Amino acid sequence: MSSSAGEMNLDEYFQRIGFQGPHDKADLETLTSIHQLHVMSIPFENLSIHCGEWITMDLEVIFNKLVRSSRGGWCLENNSLFGWMLREMGFNVTTLGARVFNSTTNDFSPREGHLVNMVQIDGKAYIADVNFGVSSQIWEPLEIVSGKDQPQAAGVFRLINKGDNWNLEKTGRKPEVLNPEFSSSGLVNRMQTYQIYCFTLEPREAHNFTETNQALQTDPTSLFINKSICSLQTPSGFKALIGWTYSEVTYKPEEGVDVFDIRDITEDELDQVLKEQFHLRLQKKMKPANKKACYTLSKITRILFNDLFDNIQAAFNQMFILCFYSKYQSSKCQFKVLFFLSIKKIKSKQVNYFLL
């Protein structure tokens, strides 16, 4: 399909998100209103991968999917669509690339795998990002000012200037998990202040993300291959379906907590949850996935550690058995036990896809 935007129109997009304001006012109030409506109407989701569908950077295909087919998408789709809409309305928009923070390496990914929009209004610049999802999702544009606390429903966001880079961080609230069986769930991040991503102000084009778009769908270590994710913001928090685990999160800033209601759904409930909670109708059958994964050192995608660690652990278990029957029991078994404990320690630090 052609990448021409000729067949797309703003009226359909505004109807999709429920915007009833003026279409000819390129001001901050209008941007804020549309930004909030978008994140509460169009989910952050990668379900196409788990339905056997290919995700493209073609803008017309994205429009047909997210607007006409009432689907969601990931950042390369949602923020591309949002940027197109803003330009059609007359906003001054620049596409930027962001590097997502990797808590395993305590650094940002070396590759730009996240697309955001910078909007300039009345001499001020703002970040508009309608698709990071879950509790790291901003509801309103963030002014690009270093060190300024910018409170929103999810917590306090701030941008920190680091030379050429701008780092986005968030201070949130303590999680309160209602379901005892999920009290230690890896889906819940208990860090109150954490880094989200960093970006430069160097303009980008859609083709700059082509390689990333392909890698995230084909690399077997990709987070988006190993986890099916669907997230939608609500007036009081957000909803999320990660694999078979469904969550409703309610923000309670007056109490200093975010309340998590988490449960596993059955296969019979899947279509109903997608329809009633996320307003999605899939044309193909989805296979939910929720394998444990964390970031690699060299890619925006993630690498699975569990299988590697379990294999190493199994090998050392074999060594332990051999060691038990040998004269080297004293020295080698001590080494084995220390290595086993190290593996356990590393596994305990595994980074999952966080809801908070």
Image (cartoon, helix red, strand yellow):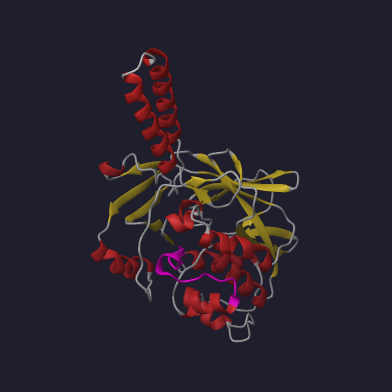
Quadrant location of the N terminus in the rendered image: bottom right
Residue 300 place in picture, x, y as percent:
58, 52
Residue 196 in view here: no
- Between 43 and 226, the one lying in front of the other is 226
Q: Is residue 218 above or below residue 183?
A: below
Q: How many marks?
A: 0
Horizontal relation, residue 136 to residue 257: left or right: right
Horizontal relation, residue 109 to residue 183: left or right: right
Within the magenta stretch, is there residue 38? no
**In the image, what residue occupies the spot 36% across and 56% down?**
243
Q: Is residue 60 above or below residue 192?
A: below
Residue farthest toward the bottom in the current orientation of the protein:
7
Horizontal relation, residue 134 to residue 103: left or right: left
Q: In this view, does 249 lie above or below 279?
A: above
Residue 272 place in picture, x, y as percent:
28, 69
- Between 235 and 227, the one lying in front of the other is 227
**In the image, what residue occupies the spot 32% across and 25% down?**
321
- Between 336 and 276, the one lying in front of the other is 336
Residue 278 in view here: yes
Residue farthest toward the front in the current orientation of the protein:
326
Within the magenta stretch, is there residue 54? yes
Q: In this view, does 221 lie above or below 32?
A: above
Query: Where are the magenta residues, as a range?
Result: 43-59
Is most of the magenta stretch helix, strand or loop? loop
Horizontal relation, residue 22 to residue 232: left or right: right
Residue 10 place in picture, x, y as percent:
58, 81
Residue 191 place in picture, x, y as percent:
47, 38
- Between 297 and 202, the one lying in front of the other is 297
**In the image, what residue occupies the spot 40% across and 17% down?**
334
